[in-house]
Image: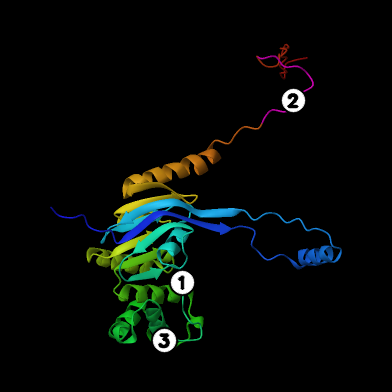
Amino acid sequence: MTSPIEPIIVAEHVSKRYAQNESRTSLRHEFNDIAKRFLKQSIARKPVEPFWALRDVSFTVPAGQTVGIVGRNGSGKSTLFRTLCGITHPTEGHVSVRGRFSTLIALGAGFNQERSGRENIYLSAAIQGVPPREIEHAIHDIIDFAELGQFIDLPVKRYSSGMYARLGFSIAVHLKPDILFVDEILAVGDAAFQDKCIERILQMKAGGLTMLIVTHQTAQVMRLCDRAIWLHKGRMMMDGDTKVVMEKYHQMIYETEILPTLNPTPEPTPATADPVSETGPEVQSEPLTLSTPDAP
């Protein structure tokens, strides 16, 4: 009897809490606080309320599967990714990721603005645990895929957002990861580059790479993902077949966001001084006189 395959990604009852109202107060409020302290007056502060970006999220991902994470802005998708990548830790629950992974969560994340694109290739590889001698074998392929040519030796602070995207994506896919986390990176860059990225992801998918992809582009989810997870306000709404999940997700968007704009609630009729019967106001009919050229 064969044993079940151990999942490569595990999230068990993951919750992430942040504190609201942590922004720095203005100079006016600082001055008022100082004045109140000077006058020995008590300062009533609004209590800090917690905000749960994730709430009791659980799922597993087997090796070789591509999973799409969908949901409206603020649903917890990026927080989930940052938790899985170890950038932040869950307030409750547990995550486990086995194997080397590459992340595409933010354009140029970890890039040193003063250093060249070539130097940042080695820097990004080192951050993800790849030694220089290993990346040396892939350096030319990274540069060619990114299509940076002579610009590879310029400081990245001079790069456009498209150049950032090409370099960041090229580094990530050439590190030979076991898992690739992609957060909206495919929405950046020109159409030709996006198509090139999609084709490369399909090649890596065919080679057995495990991927988690966050995107608002339904076509990408349908084309790339074997499965979809729908988050809403930090909670998991659905996890299953890509087509089924996306149909339910879009049905929710239609019912809650689109339909109310098509059928707005009618405004109440303002009250009048004269009473109106249930059948409506009485209309008095009067004889209608037509004026013609022959009339006297």
User: If the image is split into quadrants, where does the C terminus sit?
Assistant: top right
Secondary structure state at the residue bearing disc 2: loop
Residue at image coords 41%, 66%: 85
SS of the residue under disc 3 = helix
- When asked about the image quadrant of residue 164, the answer is bottom left
Find out whether residue 245 is within the magenta segment.
no
Q: Which residue in the protein does label 2 denote?
A: 271
Q: What residue type is labelled 3?
A: Glu
Picture colour scheme: rainbow
Tell me the magenta residue range: 268-278
121 shown above or below 291 = below
**153 or 11, nearer to the observer:** 11
Within 10 Å of disc 1 (Cα), the crowding (few <14, some 14-19, many 20+) is many
Q: Earlier in the sequence, mark 2 or mark 1?
A: 1
Cα distance between the residues tagged 2 and 1: 58 Å
- Give how far apart the Cα atoms at labels 2 and 3 are: 74 Å
In front of the other: 295 or 207: 207
Amino acid on which the number 1 mark rests in the picture: Leu
Q: Is residue 260 left or right of residue 80?
A: right
Q: Which of 280 and 234 is in front in this view?
A: 234
Q: Does the magenta stretch include residue 275?
A: yes
Type of secondary structure dominating the magenta stretch: loop
Tell me residue 18's x, y (percent).
55, 58
Look at mark 3 in the image and give the residue it sits on: 119
Q: Which of the marked residues, 2 or 3, is nearer the chain's N terminus?
A: 3
Mark 1: which secondary structure? Answer: loop
**In the image shown, does 262 or 122 lie closer to the viewer?**
122
Q: Which residue was labeled with disc 1?
A: 107
With respect to residue 215, does 173 lie above or below? below
Instruction: Return the x and y of residue 198 as percentages of the image width and height.
Output: 32, 65
- Amino acid type at circle 2 is Ala
